[in-house]
Amino acid sequence: MEREVSFCGWKAVEDRSKLSENQEPESGRAYTMFHGAHLNNAMAIINKGFVPSKDGMLGAGVYVSRNIKKAMCYPLNTDVNDKVVFKLRVRVGKVKKIDRDNHPLMKSWHSDGYDCAWVPPNSKISTIKSGREEDCVWDPSRIEVVDVACCVDNEKRRELRRLVRSKMKNKGSGCYLCHRDTSYGDHDIQPCWGCKKEICCFQGKHSCKSRKSRKRD
């Protein structure tokens, strides 16, 4: 006889969708990354996707980073109240490492068959003063917004997160909680028996507020 399992708080030992800055992304994998944008453009990005930059350090494409602090710096010369940082699921495809100035494929990597360019941290590229890693993705359809990581305006953040979840549910391509691809089989979403928040068993972490409050009592 099958029994329903109830979930409370946990933390996964390993989340393979996340890399440290020094780890080189493997071609064909999907990873968690971030992108900083102007708050005025947030809803358009969620609804229609990213518009690639026409040029930049790595040429045309969508610039993202697995370093959230780097993403929080963008857009440059913009007040923090007007910024939003998106959490993304990026299917990197074929990756080319660009680690120095005047690299022969600095801006032509896509023409050479690559889908993504990766600049490792502390590389020999003089324009990256922070030393933080950076990625450039050619095709914006490889990038999916899965959450709003940072937004000073909490009410606006809640509004944007609801829109992200709605888009993911309607698209049916991924779980809006764990961000896994569910096109080959869905999985259940249940309320946590402690705090009643919606969760799924594939989430990397769930902090049960109800459980924490009981421990303090």
Image: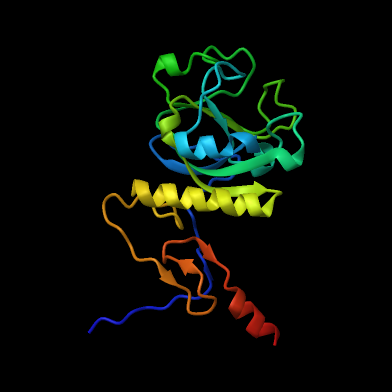
* Quadrant occupied by the N terminus: bottom left
Left or right: 180 in relation to 126: left
Residue 72 showing in the rendered view: no
Question: Residue at the location (49% across, 55% down)?
Answer: 15
Q: Which of 203 and 196 is in front in this view?
A: 196
> Which residue is farthest bottom?
217
- Looking at the figure, which quarter contains the C terminus? bottom right
Q: Position of residue 155 (x, y in %)?
A: 65, 54
Q: Where is residue 195 in the image (x, y as percent from the top left)?
A: 54, 76
How is this picture coloured? rainbow
Q: Which residue is drawn at 30% across and 58% down?
A: 186
Q: Which of 97 and 201 is in front in this view?
A: 201
State the residue at coordinates (46%, 52%): 165
**Left or right placement of residue 123 versus residue 95 in this view:** right
Q: Where is residue 113 in the image (x, y as percent from the top left)?
A: 39, 19
Count of numbered circles in the view: 0
